[in-house]
Image (cartoon, rainbow, N blue to C red):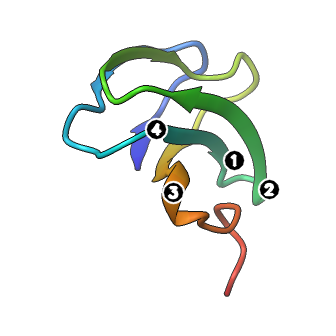
Amino acid sequence: MVYFPQAEQRLVVNLSCLSGKVRAWWFNPRNGKTYAAGEYPNEKIIFKSPITGPDWVLVLDSVAESMPLPGLSR
């Protein structure tokens, strides 16, 4: 997980420490909603937080693990 305190904030995230394809989600801690952000190879990727509001959490999961949506209890 990566915390983005501002809207439209950019950050290079090195995904090479993760194996296989990576699924990204934007989690909005203000309302508990989750938004898909795509799937990426395990390399350096530039992420930009959504335009609306401050406080976003970028959640990164292995595609192979089939993790549930961020914010949902198991």
Q: Residue at x 30, y 32 (%)?
A: 15
Q: Are marks 3 and 4 in contact (CB under 8 Å)?
A: yes
Q: Nearer the viewer, mark 1 or mark 4?
A: 4
Is residue 56 something one can see in this rendering?
no
Q: Nearer the viewer, residue 45 or 57?
A: 45
Crowding around mark 3 (Cα neighbors within 10 Å: few <14, some 14 to 19, many 20+) is few
Is residue 47 toward the left or the right of residue 27 in the image? left
Q: Is residue 6 above or below residue 18?
A: above
The picture quadrant where one finds residue 39 is top right
Q: Which mark is residue 21?
A: 4
Residue 9 shows in the view: yes
| In front of the other: 31 or 17 | 17
Mark carried by residue 31: 2
The residue that mark 3 highlights is 64
Q: Mark 1 vs mark 3: which is more N-terminal?
A: 1
Mark 1 → mark 3, Cα distance in angstroms = 24 Å
